[in-house]
Image: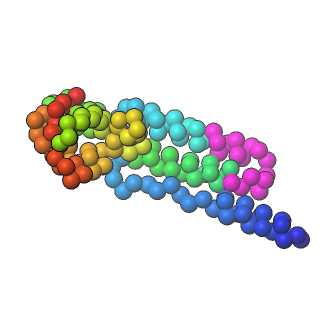
Amino acid sequence: MSVAFTREEDLEATAADLVDRPISPHPNHVTPEGLALIEAELASARAAYAKAQMQGSIEADRTAMARATRDLRYWSARRASAQLLETTPDGRVRFGGSVTIEREDGRTQTWRILGEDEADPAKGSVSHVSPLARALMGKRVGDEATVAGQAVEIVAVD
């Protein structure tokens, strides 16, 4: 057998041994939109798994099967642990709500506090377990908090 074939097979085997996606030790709080996102990802993972199985021999594309299996395990676990939280506004920073802060330099930022799988800081949302969210939870307009070593004031809560 050629050394080239052995190396290719070794690389394929290594690629197929994908490390599982880490599961957070924190409660898996989700909004209704977050639960829908998890269910969509789970359906996508199931479809990818079925497609990988139907493409013939598992040995033909071990990487696709490994990726599909890994994603299916992750999203199944996230769906099983999801805790739907629907809160009502009460004037305090809460899960599922938005908060606007004003920093010492005058900049204002608005963040929505969501579940870990639905948070996207680039789009203005953070996870409920993030340091920012933990510093602000339960506070009201006019309260101060320390975020990243700086004092911030809460100027709006939705």
- How many numbered marks have been drawn onto this rendered protein structure? 0
Image-quadrant location for residue 46: top right
Q: Is residue 13 left or right of residue 104?
A: right
Residue at image point 57% right, 53% down: 70
Q: Is residue 124 left or right of residue 106?
A: right
1 lies left or right of 102: right
Residue shown at 88%/70% (left/top)? 2
Q: Residue at x 67, y 59 (%)?
A: 16
Instruction: Specify the quadrant of the image occupied by residue 157.
Output: top left
Single out the residue that lies furthest toward the front.
105
Q: Is residue 124 magenta?
A: no
**Which corner quadrant holds the C terminus?**
top left
Q: Measured from the top left, where is residue 140 in percent x and y? A: 13, 36
| Res 142 → quadrant | top left
Q: Is residue 56 magenta?
A: yes
- Determine if residue 126 is in view: yes
Residue 82 seen = no
Q: Residue at x 34, y 42 (%)?
A: 126
Q: Which residues are magenta?
A: 47-63
- Percent of width and height locating residue 1: 89, 71
Residue 156 x, y percent position in the rendering: 18, 30
Q: Position of residue 146 (x, y in %)?
A: 18, 49
The secondary structure that dominates the magenta segment is helix
